[in-house]
Amino acid sequence: MVRILGAHGIDVVDAVASGPLLADALTRHRPDVAIVDVRLPPSFTDEGLRVAIETRRAQPGLPVLILSQHVEQLYARELLADGSGAIGYLLKDRVMQVGQFLDAVRRVAEGGTVMDPEVIAQLLTSRRRDDPIDRLTEREREVLALMAEGRTNAGIAARLSVTVKAVNKNINSIFDKLELAANTDDNRRVLAVLRHLDQRDARTA
């Protein structure tokens, strides 16, 4: 990964192999973006994630791109909980898709939000029958998934071969059906995908 980043003009200021070392590196370097594995020594559970969340509390908006071996819905929701953007969640396999990986790194560094398409697919299919997501049309679900990947309205329009005006209409409808205020906060676009998880947990708590 260090070689991939370096070969494409991205300076790597540090590469560490444990949770404590990661915490120290993030505090010392305050990087433009941190690429963090969920599982780090000593226990190989969720050290990387916990360090990222704790550091973002101390440094609000610190750009962090999380890498995980498998889809973890809880991680996705927890990462987005502060609503400040500059966060990403990718499966490790995406690193070998160099163009996609580098695009995600740059978008997170610029303050955007990037979610792995596989994560979005699982979030959209793991819903209850009475979830607000069920109010969405098939087209609105397609738009919502692409929003959550971090695509712009123009990018969504190009992907779906529709007009930007049609995409705007779908997005406004999504916000209305999920009872989310349509504002200029890009992270609200991704939180729309995760709203049904919060409602599901509240019902089963």
Image (spheres, rainbow, N blue to C red):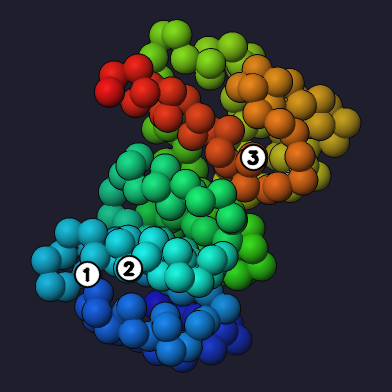
Q: Quadrant of residue 18?
A: bottom left
Residue named by callout 3: 189
Q: What's the residue type where badge 1 is placed?
A: Leu
Instruction: Provide residue 122's location: percent of width, then percent of height.
Output: 39, 32
Relative placement, left or right, of 155 versus 147 is right
Query: Is residue 37 among what the camera can see?
Result: no
- Disc 2 from disc 1: Cα separation: 10 Å
Binning the other alpha carbons within 10 Å of mark 2 as few (below 14), some (14 to 19) or many (20 upward) gives many
Residue named by callout 2: 51
Examine the rendered structure and indicate whether residue 93 appears above or below residue 126: below
Instruction: Provide residue 81's location: percent of width, then percent of height.
Output: 47, 47
Query: Is residue 5 among what the camera can see?
Result: yes
Q: What's the residue type where badge 2 is placed?
A: Val
Q: Which of the two discs, 2 and 1, labels the residue nearer the N terminus?
A: 1
Residue under the point 15% across and 64% down:
44
Q: Which of the two discs, 3 and 1, labels the residue nearer the N terminus?
A: 1
